[in-house]
Amino acid sequence: MLNFKSAPEPAFDYSNLEATELANLLPMIDDVNFANLKADIEKNGILEPILLFEGKILDGRNRYRAAKEVGRLTPTKFKMFEGSYAEAEAYVFSTNFLRRQMTPAQKQEVILKMLAKYPTESIRQIAKRCGTSHSYVQKVKEKRDEPTPEQKEFNEFCKTWDALPDARREEFVKSFAPDIRDLLASGF
């Protein structure tokens, strides 16, 4: 069970908070939705408290930014998350990844970040962290690992290179010598 407690004492500086790296795994809302949120907070204030973890924003980056811009940021609208790092991560995904309107591209970007963050974990473990299916994570991973069309073309060229007669290879090198020099100079 997750525990929350009141925010820190008023001496705590609420005006310059940063987001946790967990919150930053997810994208901010788009401009239109942010404008709507800002207008709502200007009219009604912050209805859902901003959640802090280890002195940083765990949940509520968009509310924080909007409230700050319209002058409705008050210490009473903060709560502290009481839990472990793993519980904080699970909370972020439960409240944002699963419930927020994110495009498929945004969801894929979050999964890619999680794959990079936890390179030794299985597809199923990443899927569990993100609250999605392992088949979806597998598709995202395969797409990430798929060679680009240029890489595919180069790989095919490499396969045929060894089969070319020496004269044809020399002719190729002479024809493309400036390009080859540029590639080598660029660290390719």
Image: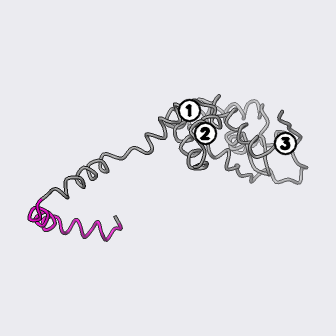
Contact check, label 2 and label 1, Cβ < 8 Å: yes
Can you say whether 180 is above or below 64 in the image?
A: below
Foreground: 174 or 17?
174
The residue carrying mark 1 is: 134
Q: Residue 104: give x, y in percent of width and height.
A: 50, 32
Q: Secondary structure at mark 1?
A: helix
Q: Is residue 174 left or right of residue 1?
A: left
Find the magenta span and give its range.
165-187
Find the distance from the CA under tag 2 to the CA under tag 3. 24 Å
Q: Earlier in the sequence, mark 2 or mark 1?
A: 2
* Residue 187 percent across, percent down from the top left: 36, 67
- Please rate how many residues cluster around mark 2, counting C-alpha atoms within 10 Å: few if below 14, some from 14 to 19, many from 20: many
Q: Is residue 179 magenta?
A: yes
Between circles 2 and 3, the one closer to the viewer is 2
Q: Which residue is mark 2?
A: 126
Q: Residue at x 77, y 34 (%)?
A: 45
Q: Label 3 amino acid?
A: Glu
Which amino acid, mark 2?
A: Ile
Quick one: label 2 or label 3, which is nearer the N terminus?
A: 3
- Does 5 sit left or right of 163 as displayed? right
Q: Is 164 left, or right, of 60 in this rendering?
A: left
What secondary structure is marked by label 2? helix
Could you say where residue 178 lies in the image, as x and y percent from the top left? 20, 69
Determine whether label 3 and label 1 are within 8 Å by CB: no
Colouring convention used in this rendered image of the protein: one colour
